[in-house]
Image (tube, rainbow, N blue to C red):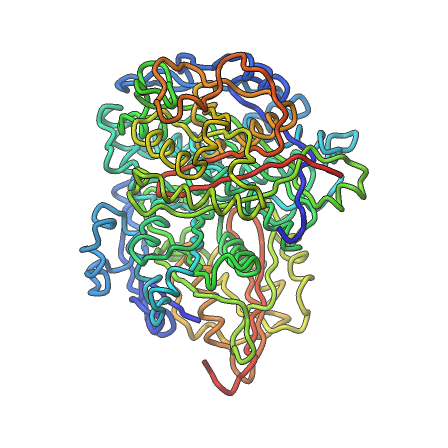
Amino acid sequence: MKRPVVITGMGAVTPLGEDVAKSWQALVAGKDADVPLELFDTAGCRCHRAAVASLPALAEMRPKALSRLSRASRLAIPAAREALAAARLLDSAGKSLLPVLPLSVSTTAGGMAFGENMLRNVLARKHSRLLGSAARYLPQHQIVDVQRALGFEGPSVIIANACASGANAIGHAAEIISSGMADCVLTGGFEALTELVFTGFDCLQATTVERCRPFDLKRSGLLLGEGAAFLVLETSEHAKQRGVTPLCRLSGYGHGTDFFHLTQPQPDGQALVEVMRRASEAAGVAPREIGYINAHGTATPVNDGAETRAYRTFLGESLDRVRISSTKAAIGHTLGAAGSIEAFFAIMALITGNLPPQLNLQTPIPEIASALVAEKEASRPLRHTMSVNLGFGGSNAALIFSRYEN
Amino acid sequence: MGQGAVTPAGVGIDALLHGHPVETMTSLVSRPDLPWPVFKVKLNDPAFERWQKEPRLRRASPLSYFLVEAAHQALIGLDAIELAQTGLVIAFSTGCLTYSRRFFEDIVTQGHRAASPVLFPETVYNSPVSHVAAALHLEGSAYALVGDETAWIAALKTAWLWLEQERVKQVLVLGGEEFDSASLDAYRNARWLARPQRKLGFIPSEGAAGLLVRRARPGDSKIISQMDDGFIYRSKTEAMAAGQRCLQHFDSHLPCHGSAQYNWLAGIERKLTQDHRPGPAIGNLAYLGEAATASAAWNTLRALASLDQHHPRLLVPIWGSTHQIGALQIENQKPSTGS
């Protein structure tokens, strides 16, 4: 990257916890958030479970303002606030110290529940309260919700590259900084569970009615989840001027499109290999130097097979040394937020040396079995970690995080 | 470099500049007895026939057809190697609205068991991007961006970023929307629709447009020399203030290529630009209706076409209808070439 990009703050709301510390602690302890889904009616669906987040209180907001927020905004605002606070960019009133702060964010459904509500009303030929719900389903309204709650404005980009969006948003933010367009960017992703999307994955038979078992021969599908994660990215010089010590560097970003099929990756994983190589080359980090990979690992038969083959090709003999896990068994597949939440996990692994275990393994895929993180595995020093995501439409992305050395 | 357009006035740049759309009457979902005028793209246009044979597009919604045709026009002349080095950014506001509505309507009216596994993948914002990239063999980076009209600016800025990073040689930037009658209900409730007795009010529309861009080189005629966005609002008063702040970033003498003729931002545009920055007479161009990112793309292409010796530089405001205000500055560096 032309200008080194560092990460100075992180915030998250996940099904495992309302902030970074609680989410990470529960994750490395091997907990999962697989619960019966009660947010909406699932009668007639095959699957009735999901990883549901508890919404943090937004004490400073009046009830009326709170009632106007989408569930997506209720997830995004606290996560963004925690990231800014961690980066020491919030004043005592909880507002951003930077009045203009570019945003690079991701989602696949925005405030879809408002859109669903509007359609229900329209189909029922009801006219009341259509306007508010119609407008607020659009993802740009969650952006304004975040900006207004935290007191800043500025250019924003909303990337909707399906399940790779979160990684794309972070990589895009890094490119904005690297190119000199901005010195500091707030980036992340958010996704709330919605009936339309849940039913969509259910009708594709992509969700499981059993346990979510990434990289297991008996895997039968994914667990849907929700959440949000935000990162503060800036130039190392900008962080230095503010007297803030970076958490780590974002050293590499690769992305590309797999043309094989709208909903299935190329079986040999070659398109993903190319994306990981691009990230690796951008970072100047050889595959053997990567200590931990937070894999996409949806636990669908097609994805995990192709992803395993991609890691074999990309890592070669290093596959026996690298540690890999998919945290979707713990927090579910958070779609547009997945890339951001999983990047946060990859960063925490880098900083702490602790590794999220691969949950629910019974009979691991032999080609990757030795690399999968066991429960209660000893911590280890790591210099580089990677987060990988694949999305509908063939959108693939990889991010590499490296230790910050002054 | 290249340009392409699909409009309710016809397919191609000539239709964008000289065509006249015909209104069709469409009923609200909630009030089948209440028809409103809309502008729709004629899907039986021969230009779409070639795409019906494309395997990836067999089940795709009209939006993918609009986009792939506009993309095809903009890419004419590029060889296979150049296509492989071309990035793709598509801006959407509502995405595949027709399939999303049909998918959810099935759930609401028939229950979850009626959910269609054929429709659902096509409701994803990224699906048309994937279809366009696959159909036209664009192997560079590909993003789907979402927002109001100003997502078009975000898409152009993304293209600039990729070119700056030397990630690709050129980038195809598209904006596209498809009409669904459910949106008519939303617009009516927002009081955005045209009524015979009112001067203001828009006609919902659909279509796409695209611009193939590369880094400016000596000898290039038309360039985008400035892009600004991020001036957010949530009320009419805030929109006026946001527009003022946005336009302060541009040369105050720059003539304006207006665009907000009939939507709720038209009054703000008149106050902030057209009364003080006389530009080309856009009244000579046919009104194509409002189609969010497609409208932003159409207006940019029309503004590029109107650059001439009298107006070698133009301000092109992009009035985001639900989020923010932005603007572009475009220039003709070689007015005499006219290309």
Is any part of residue B140 visible from this angle? Answer: yes
Q: Quadrant of residue B44?
A: bottom left
Among the 4 quarters of the image, the one containing residue A312:
top left
Q: Residue furthest front?
A: A317
The front one of A327 and B314 is A327
Q: Which residue is painted at 52% across and 32% down in the image?
A: A190
Q: How many marks?
A: 0
Q: Residue pushed farthest bottom?
A: B336
Q: Residue B334 falls in which quadrant of the image?
A: bottom right
Horizontal relation, residue B58 to residue B311: left or right: left
Q: Position of residue A37 (x, y in %)?
A: 40, 16
Q: Position of residue B243 (x, y in %)?
A: 63, 56
Q: Residue, x 39% and y 22% (percent of image)? A: A214
Instruction: Examine the rendered structure and indicate whether residue A396 appears above or below residue A351.
Output: below
Residue at 46% x, 64% y is B170
Between A348 and A316, the one nearer to me in the picture: A316
Q: Is residue B265 visible?
A: no
Given residues A19 and A39, the one toward you in this image is A19
Relative to A176, is A384 above or below?
Answer: above
In the image, residue B141 above or below residue B316: above
Viewer-nearest residue: A402 or B100: A402
Q: Where does the image place residue B22, in percent across and percent down from the top left? A: 28, 64
Q: Is residue B70 left or right of residue B243?
A: left
Q: Is residue A283 above or below residue B216?
A: above
Q: Residue at x 32, y 69 (%)?
A: B12
Residue A273 on image: x %, y %:
41, 42
